[in-house]
Image (cartoon, helix red, strand yellow):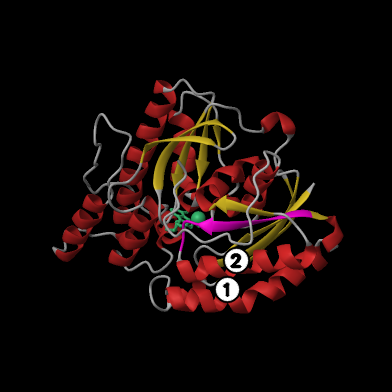
Amino acid sequence: MKLLGIETSCDETAVAVVEDGTRILSNLISSQVDIHARYGGVVPEVASRQHLLAMLPLLRQSFSEASLSWEEITAVAVTNGPGLAGSLLVGVNTAKAISMARSLPLVAVNHLEGHIYANWLDKAKENLPEFPAICLIVSGGHSDIVLMIDHGNYRLLGRTRDDASGEAFDKAARILGLGYPGGPAIDRAARQGVPSVALPHAWLKGTDDFSFSGIKTALLRMMQSGSIASTADAASSFQEAVVDVLVAKTAEAAREHRVKQVLLAGGVASNTRLRQRIVEASPVPVLIPSPRLCTDNAAMIASAGYFRYIRGSRAGLDLDIVTGLSLA
Ligand code: KG4
Ligand code: ZN
């Protein structure tokens, strides 16, 4: 069964076709990174306009590159939240138009659930995730620890109380003059340095919550006082401190809830150090999507949509966007 996936929650216009929730037939992304880089961050009005410009050419390209016809598609899955209102609207309205024109069922997908389902893509059957699992969702807008009991069954254990981890990477990169987007820039710079700068860790003991605003402020103060000599060392120290907390809390949650696996999800899951250290620290096997499937894409939306579709989930043409949609 082939599902079309559409994702426009932030600054990537993405279209994909996925078979049985696992096999990618087509996965296209039109990135707006270069446009937003000029402003040092995503400009919502610019993002929604770019989605409009990119959407139809991307849909055509997706079908032609994978030699697919509309008759082969069973349903359309679309992200309806969380995300930027103007951006989400383009995807949701495109999906509704397709659903109406082609008489195809519509499935609404939570963007965060999509990130988790990147772990189902391009995997051999014996390597698919097993339940229960602890999911660490780390993106530009979220840092959540979620207990996934079964398909579509989530318990939110912890979340960030201030900045998301990806947001912290982006802000730290700006402080260090490394440009936008900050995560990949810090990841690269850190390889040339050592974690020699002492930065605070917010452990928030006894909870599964995170806080990343203090470390960013500490970094800013150190830069302003001129006490940091090497940008590479500062990048490495920042990355190590964020990864310390993410890894320790995820491993602890995996032990406490006696899960079978840990699943990483979201843009920050493409971070080199996080990928290494979570595997070393976890008491159970860790699944991590390939880096290009960690950041926003539509294949993950088609996958999550498939598992929703086979459980009977359908959205009507009155489907609305929910900018603050939560997973559980
Ligand atoms: O999941 P995503 O593509 O979009 C959201 O849903 O937010 O995540 C984007 C975030 C950005 O903050 C970006 O800086 C971060 O993921 N990111 C990384 C890396 N690649 C992307 N953070 C750390 N290391 C990376 N290699
Ligand atoms: Zn995302």
| Tag 2 and tag 1, C-beta contact below 8 Å | yes
Q: Is residue 92 left or right of residue 212?
A: right
Q: Which residues are magenta?
A: 74-83
- Front residue of 179/109: it is 109
- Front residue of 99/14: it is 99
Q: Secondary structure at mark 2?
A: helix
Q: Position of residue 317 (x, y in %)?
A: 63, 62
Q: Secondary structure at mark 1?
A: helix
Badge 2 density bin: few <14, some 14–19, many ≥20, Cα 10 Å:
many
Picture quarter containing residue 100? bottom right
Can the viewer see residue 296 in this picture?
Answer: no
- Residue type (three-letter) at the residue carrying disc 1: His
* Label placed on residue 51: 1
Answer whether residue 81 is magenta in the image.
yes
Residue occupied by mark 2: 91
Badge 1 density bin: few <14, some 14–19, many ≥20, Cα 10 Å:
many
Q: CA distance from mark 2 to mark 1?
A: 8 Å
Can the viewer see residue 64 in this picture?
Answer: yes
Residue pictured at 35% horizontal, 52% vertical: 164
